Amino acid sequence: MKKTLIQTAMVAVLGFVTLAPVVASAEDGTITFTGLITDTTCVVTGGGAATGTKNIAVALPTVSSSSLSESGMTAGDTNFSLNLAGPNCTAGKTAALWIESTQTPLDTETGALINQAASGATNVEVRLVNPENMLPIKLATDGNVLPGKTLIDENNQPAAKINPTRSATLNYVAQYLAVGGAATPGEVNTYLTYSMQYN
């Protein structure tokens, strides 16, 4: 009885080895990841139409759906700012937002924020604009801040150098954007998740 069990086990093991896929040992390359953790930590406070600290709220105005009657139309331009300050806000560093894209409802085609309101307005998103050039910020495109630059070229995001008093201001315009046709009436509620980046 023992002999039969051992033989059966050996056949099962040998059969598994025979059927196991062959793994190629050749390499195609290496991916190396580098980064830097900094002790620069600015406290972020909303300014203009934005309120709050760290978790910021921006209230857009109530607009008529007729002002968003065609795809591509915008309405409700709202100026707001993110004010950076604090004892660990290192003077001389340049700061900008880093959008956490896997935690943000992004439309990768428009670079805007998808409406999350249950039974809310349809065909409408919230877009951010850089007030320095009045061009859309591409929230779905990553870009690293460079020292002393006031713009991230890859996505048109504003950047600001932290001044000697350990403060800086990032300015934005939020607006409704009609997408895919005329916007329908209803609530609009969306968000972005961010980290601050410094260089």
Image (tube, rainbow, N blue to C red):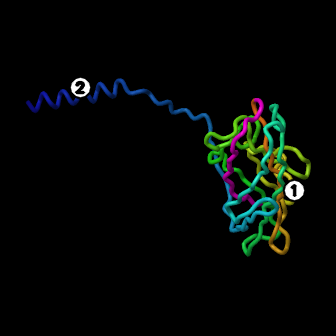
Is residue 18 a member of the stretch shown in magenta? no
Q: State if disc 1 and disc 2 touch (CB < 8 Å).
A: no
Query: Where residue 49 appears, x then y in whole percent?
Result: 80, 59
Q: Which residues are magenta?
A: 181-199
Is residue 187 a member of the stretch shown in magenta? yes
Q: Is residue 30 left or right of residue 111?
A: left
Query: Where residue 110 appears, x then y in whole percent?
Result: 76, 37
Q: Quadrant of the N terminus?
A: top left
Position of 50 relative to 43 (above/below): above
Residue 71 appears in which quarter of the rendering? Answer: top right
User: Which residue: 23% across, 26% down?
Assistant: 11
Q: Quadrant of the C terminus?
A: bottom right
Distance between the Cα atoms at labels 2 and 1? 69 Å
Pointer 2 or 1: first along the chain = 2
Query: Where residue 70 appears, x then y in whole percent?
Result: 82, 31
**Dominant secondary structure (helix, strand or loop) of the stretch shown in magenta:** loop
Residue at the disc numbered 2:
11
Residue 177 appears in which quarter of the rendering? Answer: top right
Residue at the disc numbered 1:
150
User: Which residue: 66% across, 41% down?
Assistant: 120
Mark 1: amino acid: Thr
Query: Where residue 21 appears, x then y in whole percent?
Result: 42, 27
